[in-house]
Image (spheres, rainbow, N blue to C red):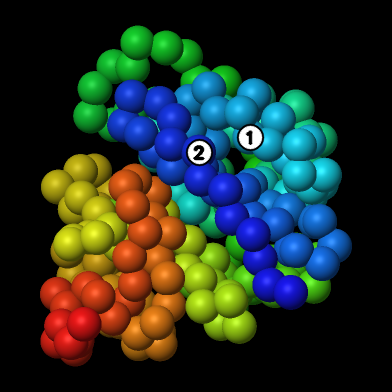
Amino acid sequence: MGIEIRTFPAGPLETNAYLVADATSGEAVAIDAPPAVTAALVAAAATEGWRIGRIVLTHAHWDHIADAAALKAATGAPLAAHPLAIPRLKEPGSAIFDLPFEIPPVEPDELLDDGDEVRVGETTFRVLFLPGHDPAHIALHSAPDQALFSGDVVFPGGHGRIDIPGADQATMDRSLVRVAALPPETVVYPGHGATTTVGAEGWLPGRTRKD
Ligand SMILES: [Zn+2]
């Protein structure tokens, strides 16, 4: 029956949180926790009758983790992230400027790395470790559902910033090669903005725009 997806842009950078449910079982995963997203996300799950069984953080930038503690408290769900996210989740903040609000520290309950699986009911996501924008960056891919939750790796028309601390162009390029190797019909659900597909992003290494 596949997956159902709700998108919640939140916070000053309109960071997308996703609520992704396995349609058969109603089991759901929350992906990313932008500022003040918790109430809307939890209400949507209640309306749909979905149970949020896990929270996954794609990476540790403040606009993706600000509500992690609140979302965890509201759902009781375990929080999962890449091991390299631990230090920044302990001392959250921006590496570039002072935030006008405090982000409560949080500890992951589960660690995810390349090749790990995230089960959501009958749906299984494969974890891709895609550093470059952030050293702790992961994405979730479901081949049967043709869906990639890409965080800040791929947006329509370009990749995530590499001019910030911890970012690196060569590392990003290697991650982009892996994204480009996914089937072209794969829908990309990015950390900001609208969805796209791997095939539509002709700038990805090794791809030329065909559609
Ligand atoms: Zn980011």
Question: How far apart are the alpha carbons under marks 2 and 1?
Answer: 7 Å
Asked if labels 1 and 2 touch by Cβ distance under 8 angstroms, the answer is yes
Mark 1 surroundings within 10 Å by alpha-carbon count, few (fewer than 14), some (14 through 19), many (20 or more): many
Residue located at (51% from left, 78% from top): 146
Question: Residue 5, how many percent across, how many down?
Answer: 59, 55
Left or right of residue 171, residue 128 in this image: right
Residue 111 in view = no
Q: Nearer the viewer, residue 47 or 26?
A: 47
Left or right of residue 178, residue 30 in this image: right
Q: Nearer the viewer, residue 191 or 72?
A: 191
Quadrant of the image occupied by residue 174: bottom left
Q: Name the residue that disc number 1 marks.
A: 41
Amino acid of disc 1: Leu
Quadrant of the image occupied by residue 179: bottom left
Q: Name the residue that disc number 2 marks.
A: 8
Question: Residue 87, how many percent across, how many down?
Answer: 50, 39
